[in-house]
């Protein structure tokens, strides 16, 4: 298992878990949340290919829209 920090809460996940899988586990709709990994924004389309590693810090936040 790996340990990540989601909004300052430690979570254990199987090795090889992706950011997209984390959202499913957290029951969060992909379009309802923006994501950052270790302080870097991760675009929605990049989440399935973003493999989480031990110690990652993940932040979920409301997307900002406007024009």
Image (tube, helix red, strand yellow):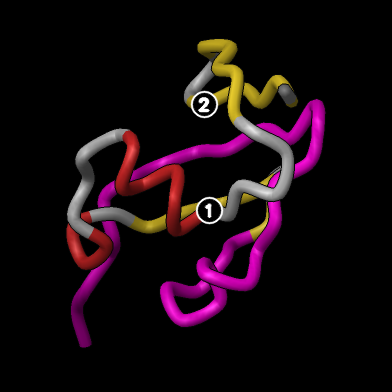
Q: Residues within 10 Å of mark 2 (few under 14, many from 20)?
A: some
| Residue at 52%, 26% in the rendered image | 6
Q: Determine whether label 2 and label 1 are within 8 Å by CB.
A: no
Question: As drawn, is 34 to the left or to the right of 66?
Answer: right
What whole-number distance in Å separates the C-alpha atoms at marks 2 and 1?
11 Å
Query: Residue 54 has which mark?
Result: none
Q: Which range is magenta?
A: 41-67
Q: Secondary structure at mark 1?
A: helix
* Residue 50 x, y percent position in the rendering: 65, 63
Residue farthest along the top direction in this orientation? 9
| Residue at 56%, 51% in the rendered image | 36
Q: Specify the quadrant that holds the C terminus.
A: bottom left
Q: Earlier in the sequence, mark 2 or mark 1?
A: 2
Residue indicated by mark 1: 19
Where, by quadrant of the figure, is residue 2 drawn? top right
Residue farthest along the bottom direction in this orientation? 67
* Residue 20 x, y percent position in the rendering: 44, 58
| Residue at 28%, 60% in the rendered image | 63
Residue indicated by mark 2: 6
* Residue 59 x, y percent position in the rendering: 50, 38
| Residue at 22%, 45% in the rendered image | 28
* Residue 19 x, y percent position in the rendering: 53, 53
Position above or below: 9 against 66: above
Q: Secondary structure at mark 2?
A: strand
């Amino acid at each position: 298992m790996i340990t990540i920090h989601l909004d300052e809460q430690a979570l254990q996940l199987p090795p090889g878990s992706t950011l997209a899988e984390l959202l499913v586990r957290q029951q969060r709709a992909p379009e309802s949340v923006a994501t950052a990994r270790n302080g870097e924004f991760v675009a929605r389309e990049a989440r399935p290919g973003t493999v989480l590693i031990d110690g990652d810090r993940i932040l979920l936040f409301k997307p900002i829209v406007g024009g």
